[in-house]
Amino acid sequence: MIRINDIIDKITEYHPDADLDIIDRAYIYSARVHDGQVRLSGEPYLSHPLEVAGILADMKLDVVSVAAGLLHDVVEDTHASIEEINEMFGKDVSHIVSGVTKLSVLPFSSGSQARQAESIRKMILAMADDIRVILIKLADRLHNMRTLKFHSPKKKVKIARETLDIYAPIAGRLGIYWMKEELEDTSFMYLQPEEYSKIENYVRKDKEEGEQYIETVKSIIKKKMDERNLNCEVLGRYKYFYSIYKKMISQNLEFEEVYDIIAFRIILDTIPQCYEALGLIHSLWKPVAKKFKDYIGVPKPNMYQSLHTTVIGPFGER
Ligand code: MN
């Protein structure tokens, strides 16, 4: 279980001059009003706001967000009132806690259709006049998904469905892709356990060879970039399970036929360097026709910018 000192250490690292007094006070207050409450996991309830605040600190958010994260459930689940939060922690924190509380009482019908899901997502984004409300709600959902196994089977499916339809797309829209991927993969695990473990087994079987392959390709890329004095970081990893699954379904493939399950990322300093790196990759390995996307020239609606391509790699693989 994360401790308040871990959270304070994280904040101090990215914000050395932060006024940590509000974090201390929010922690003490939250501990007091949640005292005696227990999570389904059997842990003290306080572990949940602490984990949520830890996720927010990992995202390097400001102290107001982290304090509001510690307090995000006090109005809904304890005798605390918004007026009291306002008096003790100020207008910003109380405004955010109030926003998160309003979102948590929204009614969701399970098995909602795509259009309905879109209108719920729009409503959530419109209700939150402060983006920090959404970020706390997402961190809250992420920790609830991490601890979903303690719920009843029916509740697991309902929450996972809602996460996949509503919250994962919001995380994606905000450009928080690591969170979108974790929310999707965890939902996928509860909604389609058989398909999930099938893919998990395939990837595990493939793992040792795969790790070696990733290192080989990374060093080829790095060498090529070094030759042109392109200062860069090269990353390689398996795509996440749900994206592999979606590809299998949309293209009607067996796992063995999904070739591009490993993705590489080259991070450079400037935009011209990105295009230069792309040119180097395309001269090194043959690009697959129509698989190139220029999200720098045409950013995604959330301003995500990068170049995507598929190439035939050193061993004939995509
Ligand atoms: Mn919560």
Image (tube, rainbow, N blue to C red):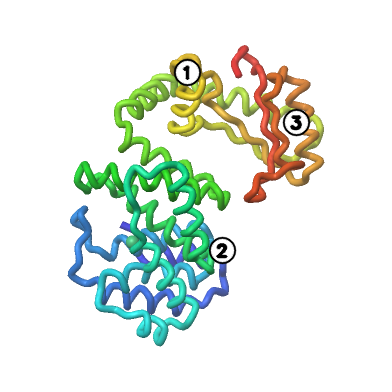
Quadrant housing the N terminus: bottom left
Numbered badge on residue 14: 2
Look at the numbered disc 2 and say if its residue's Cβ is closer than 8 Å to ligand 1: no
Read off the residue under disc 1: 252
Location of ligand 1 given as a quarter of the image:
bottom left
- Evaluate whether residue 57 shows in this view: no
Return the x and y of residue 46 as percentages of the image width and height.
28, 65
Residue type at mark 1: give it: Asn
Q: Position of residue 169 (x, y in %)?
A: 49, 46
The amino acid on which the numbered mark 2 sits, given as a three-letter code, is Tyr
Residue at the (63%, 35%) spot, across then down: 265
The one nearer the camera, 277 or 16, is 277
Task: Establish if 257 lies above or below 194.
Answer: above
Q: Which mark is residue 278?
A: 3
Quadrant of the rendering where the C terminus is positioned: top right
| Alpha carbon separation for disc pair 1 and 3 | 30 Å
